[in-house]
Amino acid sequence: CDLYNATESPVVTVAAGASVVIRRCFLHETKDACLDVTGPGARAVVHECHLHSKGGNGITISGGGTATITNCRIGQCSTGILVTQGSKATVETCIIEGVKMYGVQCSKGSDLGLAASEIRKCRLASVCVSSGSEAWISNNIIDGEMDIKPDCNVTCEKNSPPDELQSAAQVEA
């Protein structure tokens, strides 16, 4: 499917108590978030999608919402994935690149699981965790800064910058 919205509104909004599965879609052409998951009980599963915003975030999860994001490409937006205000997100096997601020940002008491993804070409930082949030970051290729603020609980395992992976591949060859 091809979903777009040239207005100031998100392409898809999942409100409190609602759930959605978005599979193999292209969400684009919005000045707001491509996907906005907001409020208690709001839940989204996003799989094999491309998300590109003209100014907003790729995906915003806020107000206690939950999202599972797998095998997606996210770019050309303000922040790739924003998890905030007590929300939860699991991000696996995604590529996030070419964003104006953060590849993935987790703030205000939220939880993030980030695994087997590639994050690159982010202007401020590839990953930012702040304000009492928790994050588990494992087996990612992170090209850029990880900005971990005080008052957070973050576990990082087996993450690599791109040049270390290339060096390891040359040694094995």
Image: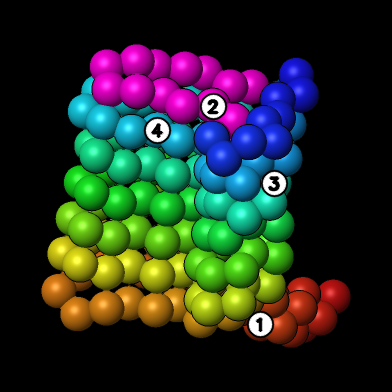
Q: CA distance from mark 4 to mark 3?
A: 16 Å
- What is the magenta range? 10-23
Q: Quadrant of residue 70?
A: top right
Q: CA distance from mark 4 to mark 1?
A: 35 Å
x and y, in percent, of residue 32 in the image = 55, 44
Q: Earlier in the sequence, mark 4 or mark 3?
A: 4
Q: Around disc 1, counting alpha carbons within 10 Å, would you say few (fewer than 14), some (14 to 19), or many (20 or more)?
A: few
Give the Cα separation between the discs numbered 1 and 2.
38 Å
- Give the residue at mark 2: 12
Q: Which residue is mark 4?
A: 37
Outermost residue, right side: 173
Q: Is residue 84 left or right of residue 153?
A: right
Q: Nearer the viewer, residue 31 or 22?
A: 31
Residue 102, horizontal then vertical, whole percent: 51, 67
Give the distance between the C-alpha atoms of the residues marked 4 and 2, in whole angstroms: 8 Å
Mark 3 or 1, nearer chain start: 3
Q: Are the two marked residues, 3 and 1, in contact with CB atoms closer than 8 angstroms?
A: no
The correct choice, above or below, for 71 with respect to 14 in the image is below
| Mark linked to residue 84 | none
Instruction: Look at mark 1 in the image and give the residue it sits on.
Output: 164
Q: Amino acid at mark 3?
A: His
Q: Which mark is residue 52?
A: 3
Identify the mark nearer the N-term, 2 or 3: 2
What secondary structure is found at the residue carrying circle 1? helix
Please tell me which residue is depicted at 20% across the width and 67% down the height of the picture.
131
Q: Earlier in the sequence, mark 4 or mark 1?
A: 4
10 Å crowding of disc 3: few (<14), some (14-19), many (20+): many
- From the viewer's perspective, tell me whether residue 138 is left or right of residue 169: left
- Its colouring scheme is rainbow
- Labels 4 and 2: the sequence-earlier one: 2
The picture quadrant where one finds residue 63 is top left
**Disc 1 versus disc 2: nearer the observer:** 2
